[in-house]
Amino acid sequence: MIFIARKPTHPGEMLREEFLPDFGLSVARLAELLGVSRQSANELIRERRAVSPEMALRLARVFGTTPQYWLNMQRNVDLWQSLDLHRDDIMQLKPLAAAN
């Protein structure tokens, strides 16, 4: 099992720090381009909302990336958060290879 010491980058942080400035976008304009409410876009940018498969498709279309780019970033954050919450329980589990 691989443990990541640093929290992975949330897709909202990537949007806020890289994509919005590079394209000169406001949250309101991003929401318009994505076809979602300003609240939805703002929650994603503020890292209070996860990227769903539908949002990944929207982001990929608007920014010329792949949906996998956004979903992989979200998956890494989700796994890190889950391990952080359940580390003790997970570490108590015995791998099959070690149980023999």
Image (cartoon, helix red, strand yellow):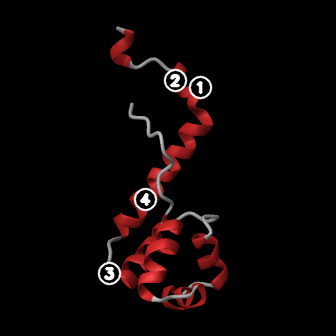
User: Which is more N-terminal, label 1 or label 4?
Assistant: 4
Quote the CA–CA distance across marks 1 and 2. Answer: 5 Å
User: Which is more N-terminal, label 2 or label 3?
Assistant: 3
Specify whether 10 is left or right of 64.
right
Asked if marks 1 and 2 touch (Cβ < 8 Å), the reply is: yes
Specify whether 82 is left or right of 71.
right
Classify mark 4: helix, strand or loop.
helix
Identify the residue position indicated by label 4 in the image.
73
Give the amino acid at mark 1.
Asp
> In the figure, residue 58 lies in which quadrant?
bottom left
Quadrant the N terminus occupies: top left
Residue 51, compared with residue 27, is above or below; it is above
Identify the residue position indicated by label 3 in the image.
64
Residue 10, compared with residue 36, is above or below; it is above
Identify the residue position indicated by label 1 in the image.
88
Classify mark 3: helix, strand or loop.
loop
Residue 7 on image: x %, y %: 51, 48
User: Which is more N-terminal, label 2 or label 4?
Assistant: 4
- Badge 4 local density, few (<14 within 10 Å), some, or many (20+)? some
Classify mark 2: helix, strand or loop.
helix
Give the amino acid at mark 2.
Met
> In the figure, residue 95 lies in which quadrant?
top left
Quote the CA–CA distance across marks 3 and 1. Answer: 40 Å
> What residue do we see at 67% from left, 80% from top?
39
Residue 15 on image: x %, y %: 48, 73
| In-front residue for pair 5/87 | 5
